[in-house]
Every structure is written in C-alpha cells, then in structure tokens.
Amino acid sequence: MVLIGLKTCKRFVAMKKIAFILLLLMGTIALGYAQNIDEYYTKEISTRGIKQISEKSLRGWKTVRHYDEQGYLRLIEHFKRGRKRSEETYDYTITDSLLEVRTPSGQKNGSTVHCIDKYFYDEQGRCRRQERRLMGSGKSVWFMAIEDSFVYNGPKLMAYTRYLSTGKVDKRFVYTYDAQGRKTMMKDTYPDGNTTYHQFKYNDKGQLTDYIRESSDPNDCFSCVPLWSESKQNKVHERYSNFDKHGNWTKHYFITERSKVLWSKRKLVYWR
C-alpha cells in the first residue's frame, strides 16, 4: 500500500465501491515480496527452503511464486479463473561481493523496461551499496543509489539513506530491534520531515503476526484504507495467522475499525 494525497483520499471515499473492485482485481499484496534492501541487506535469504508459494486473494486471483533451492525468487505467475494472465521472471548474478537481480518492470514506448538491482557486500556479507536502475531500449530511464550510508550493529542494519540520481536525499531509514534481535520498528523519513512508522509484532514463537504502517501526516492516507476507515486513513494494519509447521503464515487479514477482513490464503511447498 502506498501513501496518496488528501484530494485523492477524498476521491477514494466518494468512489468506495469502484475502488474496492479495483483493489481486488489487483490480486494479492503481501509483506516481504519486494526485491529491496530489507530482503538483501545481508546474504542470508529468508525464503531458503521454500519451493513454491501459492496465494489466493479474496476475489479469485491466484499468484504462484517459484523459488530455487537457494531461496531466490525465479518466477511469479498470476492466474484468474484458471487462466494465466501474466508472469514476471527473475534472473540473478551472484558472487561473493555482488548480487544482481534483473526482472521486467513494464513497458515504455513499446519496449520492455527492466529493473536491475545491484547489491554490493563487504567481507562480513553486509550490503554497503545498492543501485537500482530501470533500463528501456538499451538506455537508463531511472536510477537510484544507496552508497556509504549503511550503519550496522554487528549483522543488524540500523540505518541508511537513499539518494536520487541528482544526489539529493530521497529518504532516511532507521531500524529498532528487541532483545531477541527481531525488527520491531522501521522509520522512513522524507527531507520535509514526513515520517512513516512501520511496526512489527510477534507471537511467543517469534513469528511475525502484525505489520502496522502509520504516517505522521494526518492528511495522508494509504490507498484503499477509506474502504474501511473514514476517521484514520493514514494507518493500515495487516495480520498474519495460521502458521504451518515451518513457521510461515497461511492467512492474511486487514484489521479494520469494524472487524478483520480476510485478504488472502496461501499454501507453501518446500524443497525438503
């Protein structure tokens, strides 16, 4: 979910039914699938051992994610009414000091745009630089880098700054951990001071059960939150439950002012 402006937020309230249909047609949205720095700031892959994840959304979309034996995502397939509607492939270059992730990222002027992420690691396996570039027709159409701004406490990422290609600061990120070393808070702050707080809660087995995002700007709102909240639209609360024997969730809910709404179910297949 992304933040949108106040005018857009009010428009969402006025068009709830249409927005709800559009949201459901998008398929599933789940925590942790983005190919980003939170997934790759160390070389330890959280999905290692998973072969396939099949996820069904509330309105019948099915998303199937395929992983290799090292835990790297290789293919995402999207199905509706038994027919494949689209797919994304992932390709990698992996060395001791570099991880490069390549995947299609849409179309521009009739040409496929590819997203290329590069992660550069030190001798301790900690990311020290990230580059993200969008390539279309053999040309770079967008670039972002995080360089020499990573702060670690041992293996734990504590903070970093993301820069635009102009050299200006895009966002600053700060992490907080509990006594067990689990991430409990991440703050991302824009230069104007607007901050989004990402809160993570766990059960007594250490499994992530709740992910809560809230913007410091009360006029902001997360897309589609007006579908269930007309008083606090700058906050969204997701819940994960029904964990399998490997500790991975199989049901995903949104917690609303009225109740909890089932968003998706998933089934996991493991290599062993």
Image (tube, rainbow, N blue to C red):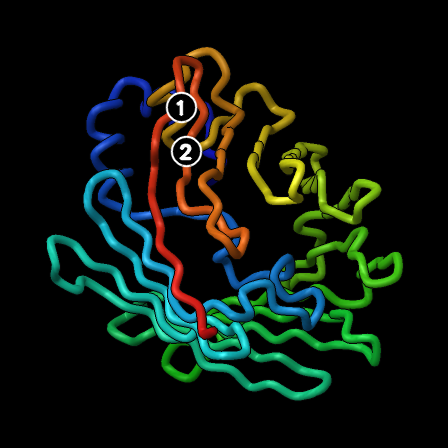
Secondary element at tag 1: strand
- Density class for disc 2 (Cα within 10 Å; few <14, some 14-19, many ≥20) is some
- Look at the image and tell me in which quarter the N terminus lies: top left
Q: Residue at x 64, y 66 (%)?
A: 40
Residue type for callout 2: Tyr
Note whether 168 is above or below 143 in the view shown.
above
The location of residue 78, given as percent across then percent down, is 25, 60
Horizontal and vertical percent position of residue 51: 42, 71
Against 204, is 143 above or below?
below
User: Which residue is disc 1 drawn over?
Assistant: 260
Q: Is residue 23 left or right of residue 127?
A: left
Residue type for callout 1: Lys
The residue closer to the viewer here, 240 or 9, is: 240
Q: Is residue 188 visible?
A: yes
Q: CA distance from mark 2 to mark 1?
A: 6 Å
Q: Residue at x 77, y 70 (%)?
A: 126
Q: Do residues under tags 2 and 1 come within 8 Å of each other at their CB atoms?
A: yes
Q: Is residue 152 left or right of residue 119?
A: right
- Give the number of callouts: 2
| Visible residue check, residue 198 | no
Q: Give x and y (percent) for residue 7.
A: 40, 24
Mark closest to the chain's N terminus, 2 or 1: 2
Please name the residue shown 38% across and 21% down the image.
226
Q: Which residue is mark 2?
A: 253
